[in-house]
Image: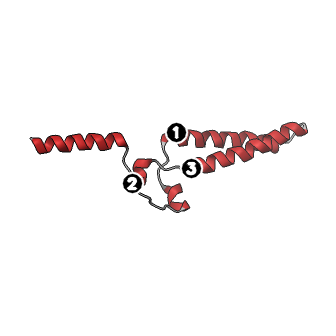
Amino acid sequence: MKQRNLNLISRIESPTPKWFRIVRNLGLALSAVGGVLVAAPVALPAGIVTIGGYLLLGGSIIGAVSQTAVSAEEYGEKSRKSDTESGENSGNQEVK
């Protein structure tokens, strides 16, 4: 397995896989709900404000971690399926 070290900036700037984009957006939504609960202009019970704080923290962590995900193809490795297909094609081309 080939190892390529990416620093944090290049990981964030690289394209994010579809599944992690969905998770990132879910984390942003949780952060928004938590922020609304924490900063509500009306007096809310302490338990709801505490839950809002946890939602805010959890959503921020989910969003940050999912943004740094990089797919294997973009990282410089190919999947096994594409390797076997390319191997079969190159073998067929040599026979012809």
Residue 33 drawn above or below residue 13? above
Q: Looking at the picture, which amino acid does disc 3 mark?
A: Gln
Numbered tag placed on residue 76 in the rendering: 2
Q: Residues within 10 Å of mark 3 (few under 14, many from 20)?
A: many
Residue kind at label 2, given as amino acid type: Gly
Q: Is residue 59 visible?
A: yes
Alpha-carbon span between mark 1 and mark 2: 19 Å
Give the mark nearer the N terminus: 3 vs 2: 3
Q: Residues within 10 Å of mark 1 (few under 14, many from 20)?
A: few
Q: CA distance from mark 1 to mark 3?
A: 11 Å
Q: Which residue is mark 1?
A: 19
Element type where label 2 sits in the image: loop
Dot 1 amino acid type = Trp
Which residue is tagged 3?
Answer: 67
Query: In 3D space, how far apart are the residues under numbered discs 3 and 2 (Cα atoms)?
Result: 18 Å
Q: Residue 95: x percent and y percent?
A: 11, 42
**Which is more foreground, mark 3 or mark 2?**
2
Q: Nearer the viewer, mark 1 or mark 2?
A: 2
In the shown orientation, is residue 33 left or right of residue 64? right
* Label 3: element kind: helix
**Quarter of the rendering containing residue 45:** top right
Q: Position of residue 59 (x, y in %)?
A: 68, 44
**Image quarter for residue 30?**
top right
Of label 1 and label 3, which has the lower sequence position?
1
The residue closer to the viewer here, 83 or 59, is 83
